[in-house]
Amino acid sequence: MNNQEAKFILCGYRPGGRDAGEAMFGAALRQAQADPALGAWLARSQAHDAAVAAKLAEIAPPAGLREAILAGARVSRKAQVTWKRPVWLAMAAAAVVLISATAALWPKRAAAQADQLANFALADSANERHGGHGEAAGALQSLLSLSSTRLARGLPVDFATLRATGCRTVSFAGKDVLEVCFERNGAVFHLYVLRSSDFPRLPAGAEPVIARRDSLCCATWSDAGERFRYAVVSSAGVEAIRNLL
């Protein structure tokens, strides 16, 4: 397990040590204890989650809400139409605050999880061991090399066949990821393919997001049917990445 895989797992670790006994977090927690950088990241993440939980805990229901609900159950249907009364307005306002707070935090957590996929692809693309073989991988490689192929519009991927016939397979968060290297206009690109069902916590959305690290650029997206998630990496620059999409 590398640090990116550990971060992916630890995103679900609740603050306060409530999940310390869960087996699924064991290896990732041990790695965080052994690696100062990962440990510092976990501490920041836990502090953020604790602060969010504290803010949400400050949202208190209006006084007398329980009694009002019980009283409403005993009155006639006509008397139950009381949505304009202050108690119901207060309850609605509390619900809006809670939903707004959750909605404000979700994009940050979703973006963090998307970044983990980009970081994984960026790190793996620096690996000297690339390749893979097989008829299915060769056919996909040829298609990707065509300037008319737009990756974000969808690709004819048969994950099981690619994996079984020799396509390079790497591990991300304990799940298989396929990689196909290809060239276009003299530049080399690394395409990573993940099954969406293997990574349900990664944010959905077909719109590509581009990230950069030093001389490398990476775009991540999912297909329209949410069957696969993709990442493509190259040192050819942002414009070259955009031209693929």
Image (spheres, helix red, strand yellow):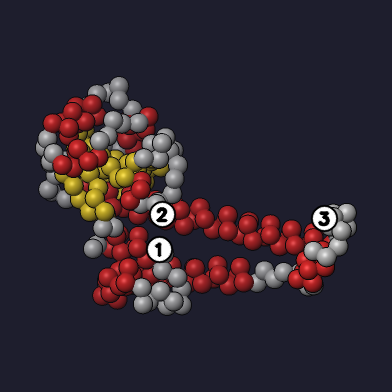
* Among numbered discs 2 and 3, the one appearing first in the sequence: 3
Secondary structure at badge 3 equals loop
Mark 2 crowd level (few <14, some 14–19, many ≥20, 10 Å Cα): some
Residue drawn at (35%, 60%) of the image = 8
The reply to whether the C-beta atoms of the residues labelled 3 and 1 are less than 8 Å apart is: no
- Distance from disc 1 to disc 2, alpha carbons, whole Å, reads 9 Å
The reply to whether the C-beta atoms of the residues labelled 1 and 2 are less than 8 Å apart is: yes
In the drawing, what numbered circle is on residue 201?
2
Q: Percent position (x, y) of residue 185?
A: 22, 26
In the rendered view of the protein, which quadrant contains the N terminus?
bottom left
Residue drawn at (80%, 59%) of the image = 89
Determine which residue is flagged by label 3: 83
Q: Percent position (x, y) of residue 120?
A: 28, 53
Secondary structure at badge 2 equals loop
Determine which residue is flagged by label 1: 11
Q: As displayed, is residue 177 above or below residue 189?
A: below
